[in-house]
Image: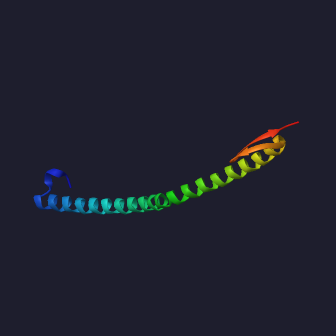
Amino acid sequence: MPAEQRTPAQVRTDIEAEREQLAEAVEHLRDELGEATDVAGKLKSRLPLFAAGAASAGFVLAGGVGATLRYFARRGREGNEKARVGRFSLLDRD
């Protein structure tokens, strides 16, 4: 029906139908957005756990490599100990 031939009641009915469709579309969008943020929220809540695990693994690996290298480096530097003060020592490397 052309716009000039519609009655005010028909216009109101059309506007009400458009409002209902818009409300349904907004509700659907909110539901979809809520699902998307729930997934991000779940990952975000686990982020500190993952970060702590990664930091711990890095610390252990770096410490293991460091200890191994220190062990082999020390074997090459060993000599006769002349004096020791705490953890420091004077060596005679003939």
Q: Nearer the viewer, residue 74 or 90?
A: 90
Please state if 8 lies on the left or on the right of 74 as rendered: left
- The quarter holding residue 57 reads bottom right
Please state if 58 lies on the left or on the right of 48 as rendered: right
Q: Position of residue 63 (x, y in %)?
A: 68, 51
- Locate the C terminus and report the quarter of the image it occupies: top right
- Check the image and report above or below for 2 versus 9: above
The residue lying at 83 percent from left, 38 percent from top is 92
The residue lying at 58 percent from left, 58 percent from top is 53
Q: Nearer the viewer, residue 76 or 2?
A: 76
Residue at far right of view: 94
Residue at far left of view: 8
Q: Nearer the viewer, residue 28 or 54?
A: 54
Residue at far top of view: 94
Using the rendered image of the protein, determine whether residue 78 is visible from the camera's viewpoint: no
The residue lying at 14 percent from left, 54 percent from top is 5
Please state if 45 lies on the left or on the right of 50 as rendered: left
Q: Position of residue 83 (x, y in %)?
A: 76, 43
The residue lying at 54 percent from left, 55 percent from top is 51
